[in-house]
Image (cartoon, rainbow, N blue to C red):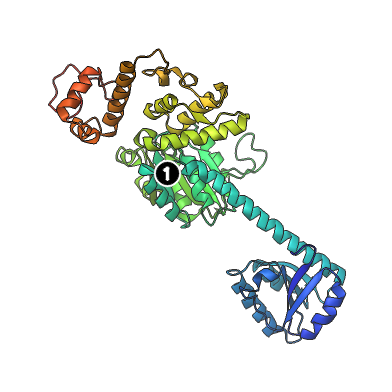
Amino acid sequence: MSGDLIRVFFCSPDIAFAEPLTHALGPGFQIRATRELRWPDAAEFGTYDVVLLDLQASDRDPVIKAALQFLTESQSRFPLPVVAILASEDRSLTLRLMELGVHLILASPPDMIELRIALRRACRFHQLEKEAQELRAQEMKITASYTMVGAEGALSEVLAMAQKVAPCDVTVLITGETGTGKELWARAIHRMSSRSAQPFIGFSCANLPETLIEDELFGHEKGAFTGATNARRGRFELADRGTLFLDEIGDLSLGLQPKLLRVVQERSFERLGGSKPVAVDVRMICATHRDLSQMVEQGRFREDLYYRLNVVQLHLPPLRDRRESIPELAHYFLRQFANQFGKKTKKFSPLALQALEENPWPGNVRELENVVQRAVVLAEDSTIELSHLPEKLRKGFSDSSPAQSYDAEIREFKKRLVLRTLRQCGWKKTETARSLGIARNYLHRLINQLNIIPEEAGMPPVSSAPAPKSDAIM
């Protein structure tokens, strides 16, 4: 819509109708008339705001047939709102036209005031729809930005797979430890899919009784149990035409697994207390921190359900296996919480950032997010210092000060460097020495001089029982 001027692409077998129509609509409307029922060319698409179809011709059947073909083709081309003028009240034809995207249908002959209102409303509705699409796109970027931060190294393959899978309407199983961001990846896949305009409904199967999970997923009919005073839709119905995310699917009881399998296979189910099948069109994304294949072997998870859910699997590595992404994630959370709390905090001190990089992060990304949030709250100026981090992260570090000797600084640096390289190389001394560019014997002396013990390197304590020789640190 160009200012207050509405540009109309008018298709009518009676081209003579265009001139009186233009005069009758009055100022504010610019009409381009054509005899053919055709969609605007790509070059002229941007010069129109609405399509007006004249279906009141005397030779009605060919016109209606051409109009249906026109509308069918237009769905896959340029999305302009359509207003139609219909010669007679034909309910089935009206419904068919609406199904094909016609915004409003007016009876012939049209009242000019009603037509002006219809054209303006169609344009306004189309404008609001475009704004909603832009907002959804922004929301997708915001949702995906967190998920994709640090998506390099170990996560680059996961990102590439997610981008391939998202447009294809297949079931996805996301695995990984608690706190790796499984739900955020599920949301990102939904936002990149053709269902992005439809609901994303999430539900966790963890630590809930079987009857409650069944009611939450499938809903119930009125009178299904004591207290069921009204019918209630479950998560499957709420997610119809959208995406249903089932978190901790490995915690689903054996009693409910057959019912879930039926929904996956047949796309229908019955509510609690009901006998009428409810059909749904739902894309499923499931997540778990458990090893479902092992659970299948143990008889704790149905094999047929596992193969139905495990069409495409995305495994999210723990944060300790992708330390290269820690600085980027930490700075992302820093900006996020600084904006949220109105703080001027902008950076980490080198020592604070090093402490974050060397922490094992058993709680993964979620734990890192909480630590950075705490640090932003405690920081009083533009820099997060080591003192703003929890005590367990400060262990083994000390704030730099002029009083600290040069030798002590060098010793601390060497120890942190050797520890970090040992972890990255799986604590194998030959690989560690090669990575550091030093001889294996010199690395062995460094380990002794710096008093590096297995527990510090992240290895389990050495037992008293004799063990065979290996290349790993002892």
Q: Which of the 4 image quarters holds residue 16?
A: bottom right
For the N terminus, give its image quadrant: bottom right
Q: Position of residue 335 (x, y in %)?
A: 55, 35
**Residue drawn at 51 percent across, 54 percent down:** 193
- Does the image show residue 284? yes
On screen, residue 395 above or below 363: above
Please, which residue is most extreme toward the bottom here? 59
Q: Position of residue 219 (x, y in %)?
A: 58, 43
On screen, residue 292 above or below 29: above
Residue to which mark 1 is pinned: 151
Q: Secondary structure at mark 1?
A: loop
Q: Position of residue 250 (x, y in %)?
A: 41, 38
For the C terminus, give its image quadrant: top left
Most foreground residue, 148 or 252: 148
On screen, residue 54 above or below 471: below
**Residue drawn at 51 percent across, 30 percent down:** 347
- Does the image show residue 207? no
Q: Position of residue 9 (x, y in %)?
A: 72, 74
Give the crowd class for mark 1: few <14, some 14-19, many >=20 residues within 10 Å.
many
Specify the amino acid type for callout 1.
Ala
On screen, residue 138 above or below 35: above
Q: Is residue 315 left or right of residue 33?
A: left
Most foreground residue, 99 or 117: 117
Q: Is residue 41 left or right of residue 187?
A: right
Most foreground residue, 401 or 17: 401
**Residue drawn at 67 percent across, 78 percent down:** 67
Most foreground residue, 294 or 472: 472
Q: Is residue 143 left or right of residue 306?
A: right
Q: Which of the 4 image quarters holds residue 27?
A: bottom right
